[in-house]
Image (spheres, rainbow, N blue to C red):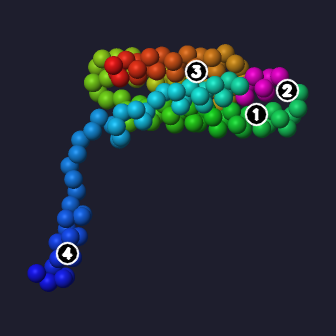
Amino acid sequence: MTLLSRINKALDASTTPLVVSAHCDLPCGVYDPAQARIEAQSVKACMEKYNASEDADFKVRATIIKEERCELVKHHLWVLWTDYFKVDHLKEFPNLHDLFWMATKTAGDAKKSNDVTVADRLLSEIDAIAELFWATKK
């Protein structure tokens, strides 16, 4: 066998796709609703600091940070929804879609508000998602 044919054979072997199947992108344990909750706690803290401040510049910074954290909440929730949860989970927990829809909508509402009750609602909705998430891990 020539050197060129050995190289071609090695390249063919290295580029042949492997067929694998997995429940999620990586072994379970990578996904965790705690990431969304931590960001939601930051949202609430920014709202509280905004409401307690008289400094206009500080309020602008708090608003910018709060809005960034709201986007991160949505990101972490959508990763859970689209990458972790499967059709079987939806069959087991028929309210799962509504929970995610409401939590991401509430994260959007939190971007437009400094009302701490909105942040509390968001935390509660994330907790409801986390409860179902952990039920799937049993």
The residue wearing badge 3 is: 122
Name the one closer to the observer, 55 or 13.
13
The x, y position of residue 2, in whole percent, is: 14, 84
- Element at badge 4? helix
Q: First in sequence: mark 1 or mark 4?
A: 4
Q: In this view, does 49 lie to the left or right of 30?
A: right
Image quadrant in which you'd find residue 10: bottom left
Asked if labels 2 and 1 touch by Cβ distance under 8 angstroms, the answer is yes
Q: First in sequence: mark 1 or mark 3?
A: 1
Residue placed at 89% from the left, 27% from the top? 54
Asked if labels 4 and 3 touch by Cβ distance under 8 angstroms, the answer is no
> What amino acid type should be assigned to the residue bearing mark 4?
Asn
- Element at badge 1? helix
Judge whether residue 124 can be spotted in this image. Answer: yes
The x, y position of residue 105, in whole percent, is: 54, 26
Label 2: how many Cα within 10 Å (few below 14, some 14–19, many 20+): few
The residue wearing badge 1 is: 62
Where does the magenta region start and end? 46-53
Name the one closer to the observer, 77 or 34.
34
The residue wearing badge 2 is: 53
Q: Is the magenta stretch mostly helix, strand or loop?
A: helix
Q: Distance between the residues labelled 1 and 4?
A: 58 Å
> What amino acid type should be assigned to the residue bearing mark 2?
Ser
Q: Does the magenta stretch include residue 51?
A: yes
- Element at badge 2? loop
The residue wearing badge 4 is: 8
Vertical position of residue 18 compared to residue 86: above or below? below
